[in-house]
Amino acid sequence: MNRQLTCVTCGSTYPLEDQRLRCHCGGLLDVQLDMDSAPSPAAFAATFESRLPSRLPPDLSGVWRYRELVLDVPPDDLVTFPEGRTNLYDLDPTPLGLSALWAKHEGENPTGSFKDRGMTVAVSWARHQGARALICASTGNTSASLAAYGARAHIPVFVLIPEGKIAQGKLAQALAYGAHTLQIDGSFDDAMYAVEQMATQRNLTLVNSLNPFRLEGQKTIILDSFFQLGQMLPDWIIVPGGNLGNTSAFGKALIEMKALDLIDRVPRLAVIQAEGASPFARAAQGDFQHFEPMQPETVATAIRIGNPVNYEKAVRAIRFTDGIVTSVTDAEILKAKHDLDRQAIGCEPASAATLAGLRRLTREQVVRPGESVLLIITGNLLKDPDTTIALATGQTAALGIPGAAALDACANEPRHVPSDPETIAGIIEEELQ
Ligand code: F0G
């Protein structure tokens, strides 16, 4: 299928190979598909389904399996682990009065987050274009993912992260995979500003979600869900919002699926932010007439972002899906994390914002009884062991979280025991009472 770059603000177009990050007007760029060259929905569905039993690397990928709706890249340039094809779990819908509740676990990707779906596309395209180095700003997961895909592609990687504000698992990955790791004295938003300036002036390939090829890969979270659910989508799709890449990608996926007649009814998107990092939720309250960046602070460090770069595309996604944006407190996020963890859908705090948001939206009767909901779990539990252990050992007050006392019930402290079997057996019997 034919594609070009199109500005979401002024509509200017550029060839796909143009290496610009933004339009001349400053607007964000989309990879725009030529819908007229698309096959019928039945032909699309049959092609995608026919690849399921294949053992070929592009078909094994839950991203490249949908390549007609992602990007044409020569097979030799593909950088894939493979990624995607994450599980979709059934959760009990009854406590919230829903008809169905699913969780799609993007933490099951090769580096433990949804970023891999976008990264395989951005890095494959960068390799195809002959990139000399790859760069990103990150709250952690993008840096871990880029470090891995860059290592696989043998292209040098530079990651800028806010010092002391990324979870240990993510830092460990970036270092282990050999990325040049630059810790800055500032927030993610400062790092994002710096990488955009440098990329443009120094011929470094930027792979944050400002890169429109990243978002083409992230669209496949929706495509994968659609096929896993038997070619249907639920009433609501709930996703955490930080830099708003997923929000934008999901909106674009739904716009395209509707235009291609793969779906006739568009699910509503609900974007959940942490209260201390909620500029998008605040803008939504005024119907997006005004946007104000903020100094972000939240225990969910993945979404500790005050000035999301994808704002305009995310507004488009909310408008197209009749969506909603709300925010939740850190205590609500940690309680939801505990409840997901206990069902072994372990996740990092940002991902649990989805369940916390759903609880708020059902309380407020925005999500109504009998509706069906899909939660997008964005990152793996092992990414942020420190917060998980703080929660289990009743140390959340030390993290400075208001309302932390309510989290005492989440404790599951390890016990110190002597080494003799008799005493240990006695303790086990006692615990089983
Ligand atoms: N959940 C997790 C686990 C994340 O790592 C991120 C973003 C988000 C949600 C928010 O997604 O930006 O598409 O709205 N992490 C980026 C990073 C910013 O650098 O790893 P978004």
Image: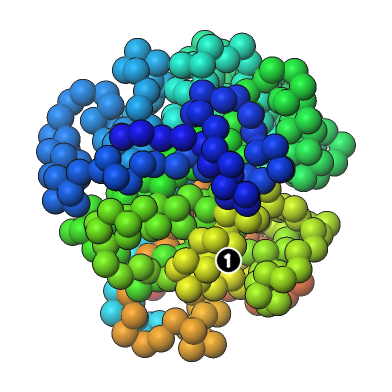
Mark 1 Cα within 10 Å, few/some/many (few <14, many 20+)? many
- Residue 161 in picture, x, y percent from top left: 73, 35
Q: Is residue 219 left or right of residue 23?
A: left
Does 122 sit left or right of 9 as displayed?
left
Q: Position of residue 220 (x, y in %)?
A: 37, 45
Residue in the image at 45% along x and 68% along y? 321
Camera-side residue of 50 and 273: 50
Q: How many marks?
A: 1
- Relative placement, left or right, of 393 versus 40 is right
Above-or-below relation of 423 to 50: below
x 14%, y 45%: residue: 43
Residue matched to label 1: 272
Q: Residue at x 55, y 80 (%)?
A: 360
Q: Is residue 253 left or right of residue 203?
A: left
Place of residue 200 in the rendered image (x, y in percent of width and height, measured from the top left): 73, 26
**418 up-or-down from 119: above or below:** below
Residue 118, x across and y down, in percent:
47, 37
Name which residue type carries label 1.
Ile
In depth, the one of 64 and 29 nearer the eye is 29
Determine whether 106 is above or below 266 in the image.
Answer: above
* Quadrant in the picture for the C terminus: bottom left
Q: Secondary structure at mark 1?
A: strand
**Residue 383 found in image quarter:** top right
Between 74 and 55, the one nearer to me in the picture? 74
Q: Which residue is found at the position 58% from the left and 36% from the top?
A: 211
Q: Is mark 1 within 8 Å of ligand 1?
A: no
Q: Is residue 209 visible?
A: no
Q: In the rendered image of this protein, does residue 429 appear above or below residue 137?
A: below
